[in-house]
Amino acid sequence: MIDVQRLRRSFGPVVAVDDIVFKVQKGDVLGFLGPNGAGKSTAMKMLACFLKPDSGTATVCGHDIITDPIGVRQSIGYLAENAPAYNEMTVGGFLNFVCDARRINGQARKKALDRVVPLCSIESVYHQTIDTLSKGYRRRVGLAQALIHDPQVLILDEPTDGLDPNQKYEVRKLINGMAKDKCIIVSTHILEEVEQICTRTIIIARGKILVDSTPQALIEKHKCSLDEVFRKITSTKKTA
């Protein structure tokens, strides 16, 4: 469902993403890991058509990110690292605005809202303005907008950032529940989260993919925790 072909992006002299290649299929939950500045968010923004690559391309559900960005955006739900929202809108107003943008109308809109609001546990703040919400509730509203059209592909950048332990558990449970029917990429710094929800793991540093494996295979190979595996690979592995 996602096919990344030599994707590259620079910012001035800094190469943020350097000719990465990978595929993600339906049923995969890919943990996209790396230290700060590794290129994770840049890669995800290119897949979501928020940034254009310098070279290379990718297809999402058969839609090319360069020649068919509208098709890509229709196929994905994207939660950015710092998901923007309109502070003066109520949660309900914002989700209805997202429905307008995605042309979800009439009974389909009612069904979408009836599904996603309890799914993301935002009933209690539905009529509040976004500027009154805690960081955790803002994150849940961001997740709701990514899920509202029931997309085939989810790209989630730090989906549990700012959530309390109970909320983290609920979001992880939600991702696990959706996994068999969707293709999901999750970026996170919480390695425990990767072990709980991810079927695959890519570790990226300095714009290059260093490892593409499974969490369990990495733990067994290195005979240590995933946290230790991550530190070992990102601190000692050299890229060409």
Image (cartoon, helix red, strand yellow):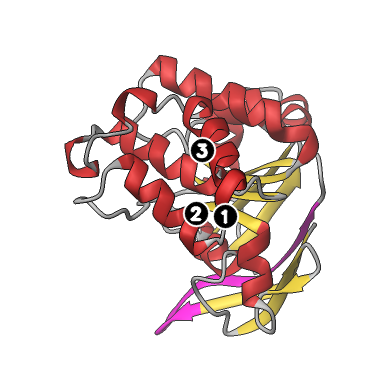
How far across and how far down the image is residue 2, in percent?
76, 59
Sequence-wise first label, 3 or 1? 1
Asked whether the beta carbons under mark 2 and mark 3 sit within 8 Å of each other, the answer is yes
Nearer to me, 64 or 43: 64
Which residue is disc 2 drawn over? 99
Secondary element at image label 2: helix
Secondary element at image label 1: loop
In the picture, the quarter occupied by the N terminus is: bottom right
Which residue is disc 3 drawn over? 113
User: Is residue 158 at least partly visible in the picture?
Assistant: no
Asked whether the beta carbons under mark 2 and mark 1 sit within 8 Å of each other, the answer is yes
How far across and how far down the image is residue 96, in percent?
42, 50
How far across and how far down the image is residue 81, in percent?
41, 50
Secondary element at image label 3: helix
Q: Which residues are magenta?
A: 10-24
- Total tally of numbered discs in the picture: 3
Gap in Å between the C-alphas at discs 3 and 1? 10 Å
Gap in Å between the C-alphas at discs 2 and 1? 5 Å
Asked whether the beta carbons under mark 3 and mark 1 sit within 8 Å of each other, the answer is no
Horizontal side of 5 relative to 41 (left or right) equals: right
Sequence-wise first label, 2 or 1? 2
